[in-house]
Image: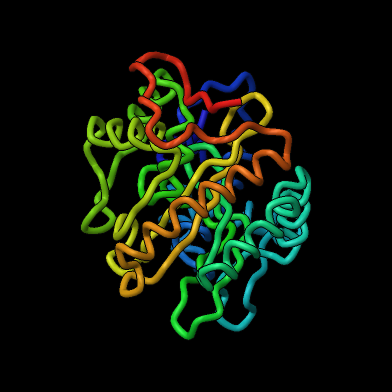
Amino acid sequence: MARRGEGSGKTDGSARPYQINVLDRAVAILDAFGQHGPTLSLSEIAGHTGLHVSTCLRLLSNLRHHGLVARDEDGGRYRLGYRLLAMAELARGDSGLVEVALPTMRDLSRLFNETVVISVRVGDARVDLEQVVGQQSVRRVVTLGVEKPLYAGAASRVLLAGLTAAELDDYFERVELKKLASRTITNPETLRGTLAEIRAKGYAESVQEQFDDSGGGIVAPVFGGRGEIVAALGMSVPQFRFTEDLRKRIIPEVVKSANTVSRAIGGRTTIPEGTPPPAASDAAWTPSD
């Protein structure tokens, strides 16, 4: 059990056969950098994690020993260590997903000269794995490797749409839908409705859901061999350029590109536009063969 006043570092409500509290706390410290900033003081880390300062100091000392955290000797602030970069590269390349997707992402980016991103679900969060940045003077650039809410933004909602009804119930039980921007959906039933629309159309779109100055997004799912959603592939466009004409031209190309990546990894393709949404049951989104 966690000590009184200290968090365990657990990030979702799923049951686990084994729980190692010290590992949970170390992960909570690493997560704090992704959620609250690239550099943090000892007191800030303690405040964000709910851990005692002395506990944080011991864990940070060990994380530094293993190269997972580094410390600025002048200011005493901490940051993530370079060893994590090597681990991140291994994780990105392990399944071959990024390598398989990159040629298609480059083609899609060149077609509109806009930024294309591929993302995956990690627990109750979305992580952007890779991007091909458009070359226009004003362009969208996302931060890779940072956990983002699974309920806000087109890519997040595509990944959320892959959960079963039971999994969604559990998700809403443990995750607070916070208002992040003017168009963030914070009502669970409204969000369920948008997920049904995504399943029916085969893509998602969003503007101003994570930040008020965020761009417009069109995103489609990438499916694995069992019909499960393994990633979300989409395009991010600055708001002032996200016109209705451009939106209509982007949608079919994004869906086509996601289908190309799905087939390349031995998966299926998205539900064609116009297919009715599945009934409200425990069935997850089922793509076409």
Q: Quadrant of the C terminus?
A: top right
Q: Which of 29/255 is in front?
A: 255
Locate residue 249, reporting x and y percent: 42, 59
Residue at the spot x=47%, y=26% of the render? 285
Locate residue 65, reporting x and y percent: 76, 59
Seen in the picture, residue 199 relative to 251 is either above or below; the reply is above
Q: Which of 257/49 is in front?
A: 257
Q: Which image quarter: residue 89?
A: bottom right
Seen in the picture, residue 141 relative to 279 is either above or below; the reply is below
Residue 8 at least partly seen: no
Residue 187 at least partly seen: yes
Seen in the picture, residue 208 relative to 160 is either above or below; the reply is below
Residue at the spot x=39%, y=24% of the render? 170
Seen in the picture, residue 196 relative to 106 is either above or below; the reply is above
Locate residue 245, reporting x and y percent: 33, 64
Say left or right for 146 vs 161.
right
Tally of numbered tags: 0
Locate residue 136, reporting x and y percent: 50, 81
Residue at the spot x=64%, y=23% of the render? 18
